[in-house]
Image (tube, rainbow, N blue to C red):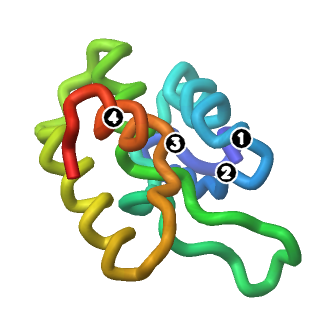
Amino acid sequence: VYQVLPTERIALHCHDTYGQALANIHYALTSGIRVFDSSVAGLGGCPFAKGATGNVATEDVVYMLHGMGYETGINLLELVKVGNYISQQLGRANGSKAAIALSSKLQIN
């Protein structure tokens, strides 16, 4: 794809079925890609791919980006609250590892 499009025109959409989404996003960052799809609390999935789990959780991506020194303009703790809320409303567990850890550590509902 790099041979056909400049990196500014490339976006990445990752599911986290095998726990590799953050590694793939990290690699893409080192390759110059700056646009990534994600989903609060990892909601979603793929009806066409048997066994596919949810999308990469926005909370996990933001946590990684902040740890790498990127400015996102996103308040991670507020994002965690939103993910927890929607997960509770849907009666499902929050799919974000960062959200689970931060919620426990900071006692966020």
Q: Nearer the viewer, mark 3 or mark 2?
A: 2
Q: Nearer the viewer, mark 1 or mark 4?
A: 4
Identify the residue shown where x is 37% and y is 42%. Answer: 99
| Residue 29 image point, x, y percent | 50, 27
Q: Are marks 1 and 2 in contact (CB under 8 Å)?
A: yes
Q: In the structure shown, which secondary structural element does the residue marked by tag 2 occupy? A: loop
Crowdedness of circle 3 by 10 Å Cα count: few (<14), some, many (20+)?
A: few
Q: Is residue 36 above or below residue 72?
A: below
**Amino acid carrying mark 4 in the image:** Ser
Give the label on residue 6, or none.
Answer: 3
Q: Are marks 1 and 3 in contact (CB under 8 Å)?
A: no
| Residue 42 image point, x, y percent | 49, 59
Q: Are marks 1 and 4 in contact (CB under 8 Å)?
A: no
Separation (CA) of disc 1 from disc 4: 21 Å
Identify the residue shown where x is 73% and y is 86%. Answer: 47
**Amino acid carrying mark 3 in the image:** Pro
Give the label on residue 19, or none.
Answer: 1
Q: Earlier in the sequence, mark 1 or mark 3?
A: 3
Q: Are marks 4 and 2 in contact (CB under 8 Å)?
A: no
Separation (CA) of disc 1 from disc 2: 5 Å
